[in-house]
Image (cartoon, helix red, strand yellow):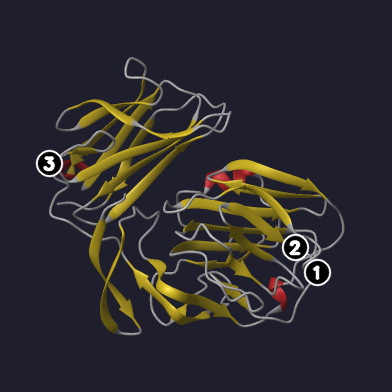
């Protein structure tokens, strides 16, 4: 994850080469900014004026661990805003008087973040886990300002180096609902869903659900994952398997807040095992199977003996496609038998 790659990105039809930290993205393409201020602006609409039902969620990866920066907002002095200050997760829902800090958003890794409000409690989530909540009441306040992704009209400072799959709802989604779609795109209307921005490219940032299309501004552009002929060989924390075509890594989180990266305990050409807390305490096994002759897919299977939170990241480096699998705190990890994992044959 710390390596750099030369990658190509399309900026309003021009091919520009930039060097950015390698990252396994949740979905296809995503919004990037090479430097400075890059954002999407969506024209003002009453559809983005919320009262007692609100959810904002997105995948973000930022490298700025300094001053406050914007993930999205509709004028933080008057209405709602989501961002990061240092690594502290911050939101406003009623202008400047409603500041709420809660949770940590780490730099340089893709994470799913969400803010919800149901008229009684505001909640912050990171990677499907509740990290902070605040009791409050009354309707959210509104603003005539445009909505900005990766910015705010009253605080024009971009947080994310990368931003993907932004979803805005006029209902407070539950934790189970957030988790149910955390690792899959939403492509059809859902109750309460106002807008979805897949951020797959072009000067227009298309809302595929509500028609609230935005424009791409500043240094913002769109990128797909860098591709390679093969992943070379396995390392201490990353498998390279299935004909050196797939990389596999895992991050973990405990109830006490301890975080770590899974260490490879054993591996072969198609599978491997990770440990989290000690080399004699194996936690998770993963294998990738070439089933192109059966259903024209590569399959991903895993099994684990843990109830800690983990995120299993599997990437086809030749196709530049990533799948992410989650387990959550206090849940006995279920087996994964994903026979539709990668439609990237041959």
Is 335 in front, or is 230? Answer: 230
Tell me the residue at 48%/64% (across/down): 160
Q: Is mark 1 on a helix, strand or loop?
A: loop
Position of residue 73 measured from the top left corner of the image (x, y, whole percent): 64, 70
The residue that mark 2 highlights is: 93
Q: Mark 1 or mark 3: name the one nearer the start of the chain.
A: 1
Q: Is residue 188 visible?
A: no
Dot 3 alpha-carbon crowd within 10 angstroms: few under 14, some 14 to 19, many 20 or more: few
Pick out the residue farthest to the right: 138
Q: Along the horizontal axis of the image, is 253 left or right of 261?
A: right
Q: How many labels does the image show?
A: 3
The residue that mark 1 highlights is: 141
Q: In which quarter of the image is residue 41?
A: bottom right
Dots 2, 3 in contact, CB < 8 A: no
The residue that mark 3 highlights is: 243
- Marks 1 and 2 sit apart, C-alpha to C-alpha, by 7 Å
Front label number (2 vs 3): 2
- Marks 1 and 3 sit apart, C-alpha to C-alpha, by 55 Å
Is 324 in front, or is 82? Answer: 82
């Amino acid at each position: 994850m710390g390596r750099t790659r030369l990658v190509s990105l399309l900026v309003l039809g021009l091919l520009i080469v930039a060097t950015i930290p390698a990252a396994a993205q949740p979905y296809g393409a995503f919004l990037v900014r090479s430097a400075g201020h890059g954002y999407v602006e969506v024209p003002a609409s009453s559809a983005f004026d919320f009262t007692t039902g609100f959810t904002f969620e997105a995948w973000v990866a930022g490298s700025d661990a300094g001053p406050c920066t914007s993930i999205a907002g509709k004028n933080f002095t008057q209405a709602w805003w989501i961002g990061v200050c240092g690594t502290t997760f911050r939101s406003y829902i009623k202008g400047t008087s409603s500041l709420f800090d809660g949770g940590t958003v780490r730099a340089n890794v893709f994470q799913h973040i969400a803010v919800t409000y149901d008229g009684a409690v505001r909640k912050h989530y990171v990677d499907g886990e509740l990290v902070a909540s605040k009791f409050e009441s009354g309707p959210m306040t509104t603003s005539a300002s445009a909505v900005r992704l990766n910015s705010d009209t009253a605080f024009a400072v971009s947080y994310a180096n990368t931003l993907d799959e932004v979803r805005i709802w006029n209902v407070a989604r539950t934790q189970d609902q957030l988790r149910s779609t955390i690792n899959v795109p939403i492509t059809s209307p859902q109750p309460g869903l106002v807008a979805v921005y897949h951020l797959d490219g072009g000067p227009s940032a298309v809302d595929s659900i509500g028609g609230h299309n935005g424009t791409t501004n500043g240094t913002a552009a769109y990128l797909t994952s860098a591709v390679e002929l093969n992943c070379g060989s396995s390392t201490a924390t990353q498998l390279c398997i299935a004909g050196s075509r797939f990389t596999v890594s895992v991050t973990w989180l405990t109830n006490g807040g301890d975080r770590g990266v899974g260490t490879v305990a054993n591996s072969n050409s198609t599978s491997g095992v990770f440990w989290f807390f000690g080399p004699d305490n194996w936690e998770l096994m993963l294998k990738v199977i070439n089933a192109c002759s059966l259903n024209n897919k590569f399959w991903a299977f895993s099994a684990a003996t843990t109830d800690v939170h983990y995120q299993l990241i599997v990437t086809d480096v030749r196709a530049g496609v990533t799948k992410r699998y989650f387990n959550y705190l206090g849940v006995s990890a279920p087996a994964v038998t994903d026979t539709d994992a990668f439609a990237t044959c041959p």
